[in-house]
Image (cartoon, grey):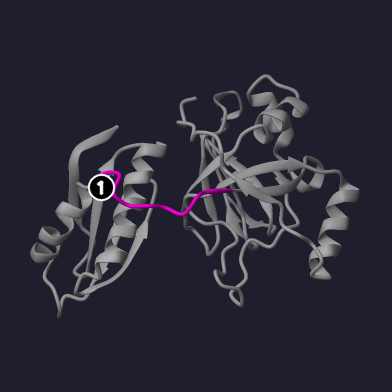
Amino acid sequence: MIYDRPKFLPGGDSALFVEFGDGIDPELNRRVRELHLAIQEAGLPGVVESVPSYRSLLVYYDPRLVCAEDLMAELDPLARQEGESVFPPPMVIEIPTIYGGHYGQDLDFVARHNGLSPEEVICLHSEREYLIYMLGFIPGFAYLGGVSPRIRTPRLATPRARIPAGSVGIAESQTGIYPAESPGGWRIIGRTPLELFDPAKEPPALLQAGNYVRFAPVSDREFIKIREQIEQTTYRLKQHPFTGEARDESV
């Protein structure tokens, strides 16, 4: 659901949340990214940083330079603008992924939970182009909405202490990739050999909000070959312009 007008909520003594609605929806997220870009272009005094999420934008400000009330007055007209920001053409980044086995220990559970075979889960997971809604949790972790209702699966009741870097998981209507080893409660169905975050690169995160991801199933042999190419810096990332339409998470 998209609100009739944005809501402003305090985020401590030096931040404001600008909420546009409630849910995982491409149009809702576009509004968030539009305000994020508009703030960057406007150069508002006192604004330190803005951080987009699925449905809201967190705006950090310096209270010595601007008060919350004055900042809201500046943000309100920007937040109610629609279709005025021009985004770079979105790209689809191909993520080679090996599914199941010790790379994806929850694949069989996801299949049983949804009354499917593991092969059907792989097919359904890899047939879509997923919008990158936001980055968060840990550096480079991209939240991808739009998982097929046929493979939606709840999070683990107790998160695992260690999830290997590159692990591909499902949590309800979301899918995502762990860019580094970390704790996590998503259902792990596969792994990619790609490096999702490198602080020495610019930008450091491979995936950026507004672009798309498509998972490409690979064999164990292909997985090892790609990993070797990455180590030798000879691997070429596969990507192409996005030509479709963003899917609502209910599709």
Q: Is residue 74 visible?
A: yes
Q: Mark 1: few, some, or many residues within 10 Å (few <14, many ≥20)?
A: many
Find the magenta span and give its range.
82-91
Seen in the picture, residue 207 relative to 197 is either above or below; the reply is: above
User: In this rendering, is residue 245 above or below 227?
Assistant: above
Residue 87 belongs to magenta span: yes
Report the magenta stretch's main SS.
loop
Residue depicted at 57% across the width and 64% down the height: 205
Residue 73, by quadrant, is: bottom left
Residue where numbered disc 1 is placed: 19
Residue 93 can be seen, yes or no: no
Give 87 or 68, whichever is nearer the viewer.
Answer: 87
Q: Is residue 129 above or below residue 41?
A: above
Image coordinates of residue 145 in percent, x first then y, are: 50, 39
Residue 157 lies in what quarter of the image?
A: top right
Query: Looking at numbered disc 1 in the image, what kind of residue is underneath it?
Result: Glu
Q: Position of residue 168 (x, y in %)?
A: 66, 47
